[in-house]
Image (spheres, rainbow, N blue to C red):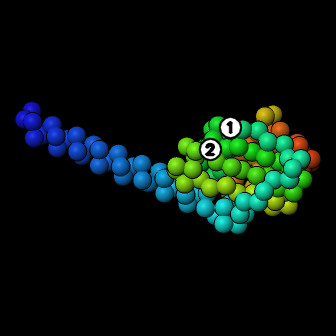
Amino acid sequence: MPGWAVILVILLVVMVDFVVIGAILAGCRAQWNPLRERHPPVDPAPDAVTKRFQSFKVGIINLGWSLHVSVDTSHLHLRPTRLARLIGVCATSVPWDDIHIERAKGRWWKAKVANLTMYGPAWCFELAQVDEPDSN
């Protein structure tokens, strides 16, 4: 294969990679921004329990070990790590009144916030004293 063909193939692969990465980032922002717009961040209460590098799934975004989570009596506070901020995830504080538990099972609970489905660690829902729903 001539040298110019190798360079052309490499450029094509790099361009496709940029398009795919851009599409993934746009999808992440499209899923996260409505949550952020409805629930802007507020400071956690001084007695809030915080755990760093927690995993949440919101819509199609799986944020494994990418959020610092604080729980107080009024909100679930989600603060992104540096890597999560690079892909467009912003801090948000969701009031407990807007979180509707659909299923509690083991370490992961499923909840709805507006029209987004959220999976998160059980400890944060338990600390907020959210009642576990009946098993379906």
Mark 2 residue type:
Thr
In three-dimensional space, the C-alpha distance between marks 2 and 1, rounded to whole angstroms, equals: 7 Å
Q: Which mark is residue 1?
A: none
The 10 Å Cα crowd at callout 1, few under 14, some 14 to 19, many 20 or more, is some
Q: Residue at x 64, y 64 (%)?
A: 34
User: Can see residue 103?
Assistant: no
Q: Position of residue 4 (x, y in %)?
A: 10, 41
Q: Would you place residue 47 above or below residue 54 in this image?
A: below
User: Can see residue 69?
Assistant: yes
Mark 1 residue type:
Phe
Side of 40 where 6 appears, left or right: left
The 10 Å Cα crowd at callout 2, few under 14, some 14 to 19, many 20 or more, is some
Q: Which mark is residue 53?
A: 1
Q: Quadrant of the C terminus?
A: top right
Side of 63 where 4 appears, left or right: left
Q: Position of residue 9 (x, y in %)?
A: 20, 41
Q: Which mark is residue 81?
A: 2
Q: Would you place residue 42 above or below residue 61 in this image?
A: below
